[in-house]
Image: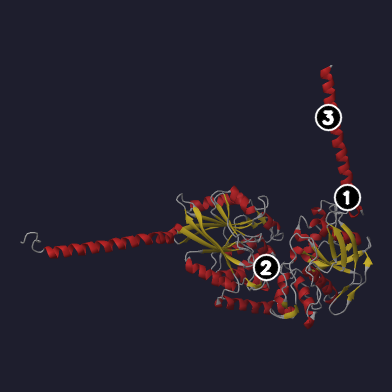
Amino acid sequence: MKPGGLPPGSFFLKKDEKMKRRISAWLLALILAALSVLPVQAAERGETVTVLFTHDLHSHFLPQPAEGGGESGGYARLKTAIDRERAAHPDALVLDGGDFSIGSLIQTLYTTQAAELRTMGAMGYDAATIGNHEFDHTGSGFAKMLNAAAESGDPVPVLLQANYAPAQDNPERDAILNAMENYGVRETMILERGGVTFGIFGLMGMDADACAPTSGFLLEDAVKTAESCVEQLRAQGAEVIICLSHAGTGESLEVSEDEALAEAVDGIDLIISGHTHSTLEEPLRVNQTYIVSAGPYCENLGSITLERSPDGGWALQDYRLVPIDETLPSHQETAAMIEGWKTAVGETYLNRYGMTYDQVLTAAKFDLNMPASGVQQGSNLGDLVADAFLWAAESLAEDVPEGRTVSVTADGVLRAPLRAGELTVSEAFDVLSMGVGSDGTSGFPLVAVYLTGEELRAVAEVDASVTPIMPAAQLYIGGMEYSFNTNRMFFNRVLTARLYPTTFPDGTQTGAEEEIEDDRLYRIVTGMYSAQMLGTVKEKSMGLLSLEPKKADGAPVTDFNECILYDGDGNEIKEWYALAAYLQSFGNDGIQSYASEAGDGRKTVTRNRDIGLLLQNWNWITWTVVLGTAIAVFLVIGLVRAGFRAVRRRKRAKRS
């Protein structure tokens, strides 16, 4: 061996060491790569969860014209959005917060075909809760819908409802309970997805229950029910608790039922909040609970992703509202399913009216918009609908008695605008889509009742005084013009009211301008719901106003079904049909009037503080309030003076 040389075989030894080092580096790189993937794999095994959600879909199967242009909604586009979100989040849940029905012509298949639930099942919904509009066909209609869905054999979402059940005295109780069992309605459910166990339950809110007067169901306390559901679901191993609530949020905790629920009940991770049609751009956070809403009418698909916190809770990772608009392609299978529903509507509902789903009735060069909520003013859409009722009572009704007729519609029954362009049968239905008639089919019918002239003026006073506290009570009247000052005393705001002639598109005219006679009976035509509300005015105004719907002979109405208007073929004249036929009467010339969004001036609203206007024409209500206030002021002054005299007497006594 040479001095400083390597021992024999040392060359090969050095080469082996290099190879070992390379192998070690490769192994280290592989280990590091594997470690870098572990968080993603862990997330897939339950470190994050994604929930897709909607609420208040209201049978909006098809896109609607959007304010400002473009389109909004439609289930074929919604299905595309769901599929895209599930491609990114394969384990995502799809849930709904109720009111999936009532809002388009396809709802006419509700009791016989259950089109809403069957389409939701095809779109991949896991679960939904029940909203108040699911009872628009009464509790019996709800039961028929459940049976139709169950017997179809199609996939449908699980329905969850924990605090709403048929009342003991409901004569349909057994049939409804059987239908709920047949469908599989539950209070709670456990669902395992992506390594995470979800516990889900459904609730009905107090206001929602009040909006379902024909349900025949009894509401139980939401807080106590939620506490029980959370306890049960945790005991079954639920890691994420989700409440599908049809209660809603509002501007204050007193009217924000879902915020109050989250404040009162521990352990709810997520509330999907329906009923109030809220659109929450960011989730509300109350007592470690996230509250989310995506807006009504299929405008958006909500998506929320939560990640597990070190303490075992869930924290917000991502929240998005995905717009459902014309930028999304339609899912072809869903679109074909909807076309099938449209065909069924034509065959089973529209044929009796001689109309088709997409039939063009007339056109308008301007929008007829929904009235601004709570803003007291006229409305071109409200005026149009009121005139449609008046025209239908004169032109479509089988029996038209002599005398003057006045028509009334309310803000709360107007459900959609009419956008500029061609106006179709389905769009007319969308405007007045609520309710069911005595014939069991969709749509409130028109009814004719009678009020005295004094009561007719009180109708205008309802519009003037009740609207600020109940925006849905804002009225639009055909055949009568009136004015009121919003700065006058409640229930004494109306300044003038008189009948005026209405000219229809065919040139016919109703009566002439005339003063209202207090003791004379006037025929009032309105929708069934609004007619029923007239009889509640005395209660809601604390007895200050009284409206008692009557028959032509002056006898009180005890059954509004006896007042329904029918056409010559014996069909109920539905609110929507009155509007559709009235639109059709404009013909190819289109709608020329009703261009002003604030109405045509038949309702004049002033906010004048002129002392002369405020002091004129006081009724007994204003005099009572003024005199009562004056007496109270004198009493306070007397008490203050008595107090001062007592103090002076005590001071004099101390000096003496």
* Residue 442 visible in the current orientation: no
Q: How is the image coloured?
A: secondary structure
Q: CA distance from mark 1 to mark 2?
A: 42 Å
Label 1: state its secondary structure: helix
Q: Which residue is mark 2?
A: 102
Image quarter (top left, top right, bottom left or bottom right) of the C terminus:
top right
Residue 511 position in % (x across, y down): 92, 72
Q: CA distance from mark 3 to mark 2?
A: 64 Å
Residue type indicated by callout 3: Gly
Mark sitting on residue 622? 1
Q: CA distance from mark 3 to mark 1?
A: 31 Å
Observer-side mark, 1 or 2, equals 1
Residue 505 position in % (x across, y down): 84, 78
Q: Is residue 632 left or right of residue 360?
A: right
Residue type indicated by callout 2: Ile
Sequence-first disc among 1 and 2:
2
Looking at the image, the residue that sits furthest to the left is 1
| 607 w.r.t. 643: above or below | below
Q: Residues within 10 Å of mark 3 (few under 14, many from 20)?
A: few
Sequence-first disc among 3 and 1:
1
Q: Which residue is mark 3?
A: 643
